């Protein structure tokens, strides 16, 4: 069997959902047959040390470009071709189709037999812009397969492709490690450490950015507290929106019922999921559809942990929820009162009904085991390559 060259700008130790997706998939391929060509996380001594430690711990070869943003420039294309030939790679997996998939014809000429490119939420945004749409069409023509996260992203991206390229699209979402995210993941210890042992907890685990909808949760808290006075909103994660959210909690008068953990190491995320009674992230679509939720793997991680979920209706987020079975999908408004009211109503219903929480949590756990396990999805990728 030939080797696979993974070409990606998004790879750890750079944090993020795409990065975690690619790394998890790479770990489930034969390490003797994987070479990763990735950008450098960040410049400076600290970034270089963190990257070197990470790369040394991997079971496969990692080659870093000097740039912090890997783009299909002539230099990057030449280097990818060199690596393909040097390591005897017969297949290429572009971690994000746009824009790196534009290198596909050059790699095909260099000997690549299979070219697979994975699409995420931003390619769905590209599909709505004339110039970017034309580039996406070229990527579809140059590769053997474009993968998609869910029906929302498939329908948006397929509309920009030729009929033949659209027919070759294959479903390949991120997976969930059901052995790591499970009901006994350590949530009780986190609750005890935060002084929340006896309080109803709504948890949101995500980057702190406007699209995720943590502000809607904060604005919904007065309605929640009117029905469940001892409820607490636990916001887990870091990001540029953090200070704005803290000020909003103060201005809304709910600061005493909102806890911010700040950034949390990946290995502690399952326990923080487990610290909640309900998981909620009412994500929204922004910038005319350019800033959209591709899937929302956190909903599935919460389901694997046994929690009911409240998800926003942005992009592909509803693909990660069985509405009415594993949780509910609510409108993800830009601070609109209806979004806050609907979010609060769903949270109050769940906090007030332990049997409903148990039933939805168990259904979510079973669904993850049936459809979203990493081993199932990695097998699909191996077949594509």
Image (tube, helix red, strand yellow):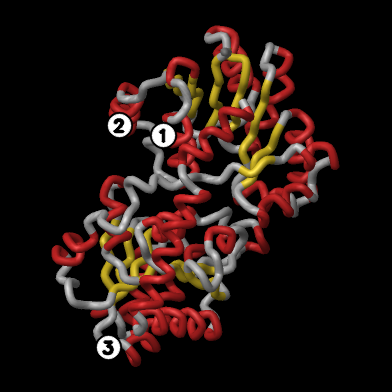
Find disc 3 in the rendering and name its residue: 229
Disc 2 to disc 1, how far (Cα)?
Answer: 9 Å
Residue at numbered disc 2: 50
* Few, some or many residues within 10 Å of mark 1 (<14, 14–19, 20+): many
In this picture, residue 318 sits left or right of residue 220: right
Q: In this view, does 176 lie above or below 293?
A: above
**Callout in the foreground (3, 2):** 3
Image quarter for residue 273? bottom left
Q: Nearer the viewer, residue 43 or 188?
A: 188
Q: Quadrant of the N terminus?
A: top right
Callout 1 secondary element: loop
Residue 333 appears in the rendering: no
* 283 to 347, vertically: above or below: above
Residue at mark 1: 41
Q: What element carries label 3?
A: loop
Q: Distance between the residues labelled 3 and 2?
A: 44 Å
Image x and y of residue 264, in percent: 28, 52
The image position of residue 59, as x and y in percent, is 36, 21
Which label lies toward us, 3 or 1? 3
Indicate which disc, 2 or 1, sits on the residue closer to the N terminus: 1
Toward which corner of the image does residue 229 lie, by quadrant? bottom left
Circles 2 and 1, Cβ within 8 Å, touching? The answer is yes
């Amino acid at each position: 069997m030939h080797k696979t060259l993974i070409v990606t700008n998004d790879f750890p130790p750079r944090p993020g959902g795409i990065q975690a997706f690619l790394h998890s998939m790479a770990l489930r391929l034969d390490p003797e047959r994987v070479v990763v060509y990735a950008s450098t996380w960040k410049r400076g001594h600290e970034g270089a040390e963190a990257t070197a430690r990470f790369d040394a711990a991997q079971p496969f070869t990692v080659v870093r470009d000097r740039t912090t943003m890997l783009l299909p420039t002539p230099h990057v294309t030449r280097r990818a071709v060199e690596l393909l030939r040097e390591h005897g790679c017969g297949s290429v997996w572009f971690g994000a189709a746009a824009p790196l998939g534009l290198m596909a014809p050059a790699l095909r000429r260099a000997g690549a037999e299979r070219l697979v490119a994975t699409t995420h939420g931003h390619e769905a945004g590209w599909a709505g812009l004339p110039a970017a749409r034309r580039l996406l069409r070229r990527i579809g023509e140059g590769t053997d397969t474009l993968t998609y996260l869910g029906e929302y992203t498939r329908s948006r991206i397929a509309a920009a492709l030729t009929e033949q390229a659209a027919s070759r699209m294959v479903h390949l979402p991120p997976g969930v490690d059901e052995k790591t995210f499970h009901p006994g993941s350590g949530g009780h210890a986190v609750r005890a450490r935060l002084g929340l042992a006896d309080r109803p907890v709504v948890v949101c685990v995500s980057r702190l950015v406007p699209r995720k909808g943590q502000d809607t949760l904060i604005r919904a808290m007065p309605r929640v507290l009117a029905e469940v006075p001892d409820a607490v909103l636990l916001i887990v994660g870091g990001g540029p929106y953090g200070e704005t959210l803290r000020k909003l909690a103060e201005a809304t008068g709910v600061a005493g019922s909102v806890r911010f953990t700040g950034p949390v190491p990946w290995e502690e995320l399952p326990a923080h999921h487990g610290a909640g009674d309900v998981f909620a992230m009412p994500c929204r679509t922004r910038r005319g559809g350019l800033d959209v939720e591709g899937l929302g793997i956190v909903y599935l991680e919460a389901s694997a942990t046994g929690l009911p979920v409240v998800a926003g209706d942005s992009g592909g987020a509803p693909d990660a929820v069985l509405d009415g079975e594993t949780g509910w999908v609510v409108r993800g408004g830009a601070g609109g009162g209806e979004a806050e009211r609907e979010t609060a109503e769903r949270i109050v219903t769940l906090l007030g009904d332990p049997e409903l929480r148990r039933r939805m949590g168990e259904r979510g756990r079973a669904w993850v085991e049936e459809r979203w396990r990493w081993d199932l999805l990695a097998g699909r990728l191996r077949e594509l390559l």
